[in-house]
Image (spheres, rainbow, N blue to C red):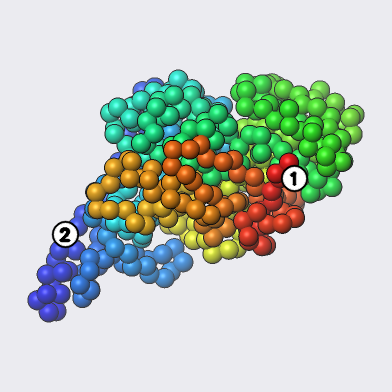
Amino acid sequence: MAPEAQRQANRRGSVKSDQSRVHHRIGVVAIMVVVALAAAACGSSSKSSTSTTAKAGGSATTAPQPTKSEITIGMIGSATGTGGSSQKFAITTAQGWAKWANAEKGGLNGHPVRLIAQDDKSDGPTALGMAQDYVQNQHVTVVLTADATADAAASPVLGAHPEIAVLGYGYFPTVWTKLPNYFTINAIAPRVNQLSVVAAKAVDGKAFAAAACAEVATCSSGEPFYGPVATKLGVKYNGLVKVSSTAPNYTAECLRFIQQGTDVIQVTMAAQSANKLFNDCIRQGYKGFFGFAGGSTVESAVSQVTGLKLTGGLFAFPWWANAQPVSDFRDAMTKYNAGNDFHDANSTAIWAALELLRKASAGLPDTVTSQTIVDALSNVKNETLGGLLAAPVSYAKGQGQPNVDCVFVYNYQNGVFKTASTGPSGNGESGDLQSSCYKG
């Protein structure tokens, strides 16, 4: 080996290998993932500092080592509580992304990513406390949210710091389309509710009804929007019923739906409670579809219900798609998120949000502040991430971001998910990454 090459190899060999630390504390289950620099391969004669890592598919990827200033992402997620059964995998997906980005993509334009992920237990005050800790004590560069029930609770703190970008997913229009530092990528209320009726029409639904959890206000937020869209599309609307997630059974509600002639029941509940309703209605003789939209759809949960037929609109890309960006997602999860599930819309939403951050970070300088990230995201224009987003997103600095009008319509029968989007494609894609839109 030549002297210069030997010196290069020695320097690379001295880089510490990836580390991850997991911390638990009483009251808040905190999972801290610190992903350090990837170890370089000895013997390379390249003049630039690079690391070579085998991809899950078997091929090797060479990426610059992330050696610039560190970027800290503070994540507020729901792993337990009311929404935990549907959303818990978003946290492990984010952890897998951080490992993958540092090891194979050079971090964020050479900046290593440090991810701090915490469980807010689907509880508003806990989410608020985490936001305060991230801003005041952790001094995070970016905040990532993955909680459909409590993310609005943190907005008074995060909205008061417009220099900190907030990414992830949520449903509250007073937050995601009003606060200028919230960069939404998914359809939120009322669009996601309206698109649930569009999905019902896509399976030739004639009568639409809804069952919503009684514990969380956002579960029934679609009530004002279902009827008008159903009328416009020629579908009968049979009303919304609030149900308790802890009810011993849903026999009475199921019989009501059947007697009304409902053939699509929109279910807005966490996965575990929804499964109980699915089973009860099927036992009572219900033959139609259930609507399951947004981030409620978790493959490992619905696959437990025999005879289940689903339709709905995913607010993030379908994990079963054959397109290359989705294949890359599955490969990365298989390698860097081993042992954790990722076949759900919350996981794909978090991946898409983080990939949008990575795309926006292409021109980051050597030293980065939280404001630098806000500025970079504000320059995003007409971005679909190759079909990972249901519609192109464009952001403007200092303004609330527009609602997204599109979702990925799907149906599920005989244990198989299929993309079922109809009409003009919202993201310009065809096949299993085509999206559907509603602008009424």
The Cα–Cα distance between marks 1 and 2, rounded to whole angstroms, is: 55 Å
Looking at the picture, does residue 436 appear above or below residue 120?
A: below
Q: Quadrant of the N terminus?
A: bottom left
Q: Residues within 10 Å of mark 2 (few under 14, many from 20)?
A: few
| Residue 276 seen from this side | no
Q: Amino acid at mark 2?
A: Ser
For image coordinates 68% across by 26% down, the residue present is: 220
| Quarter-of-image position of residue 105 | bottom left
For image coordinates 57% across by 31% down, the residue present is: 172
Number of the label disc, if any, that sits on residue 402: none
Residue 65, horizontal then vertical, whole percent: 27, 60
Q: Residues within 10 Å of mark 1 (few under 14, many from 20)?
A: many
Residue at the spot of label 2: 14
For image coordinates 21% across by 76% down, the residue present is: 45
| 390 relative to 70 in the view: left or right | right
Helix, strand or loop for disc 2 = loop
Viewer-closest of 396 and 13: 396
| 29 relative to 9 in the view: left or right | right
Tell which residue pokes out farthest to the bottom in this image.
2
Residue 231, horizontal then vertical, whole percent: 84, 36
Q: Amino acid at mark 1?
A: Ala
Tell which residue pokes out farthest to the left in this image.
3
Viewer-closest of 341 and 128: 128
Viewer-closest of 360 and 213: 360
Q: Quadrant of the C terminus?
A: top right
Residue at the spot of label 1: 199
| 352 relative to 11 in the view: left or right | right
Residue 27, horizontal then vertical, whole percent: 39, 22
Residue 69, horizontal then vertical, whole percent: 24, 49
Helix, strand or loop for disc 1 = helix
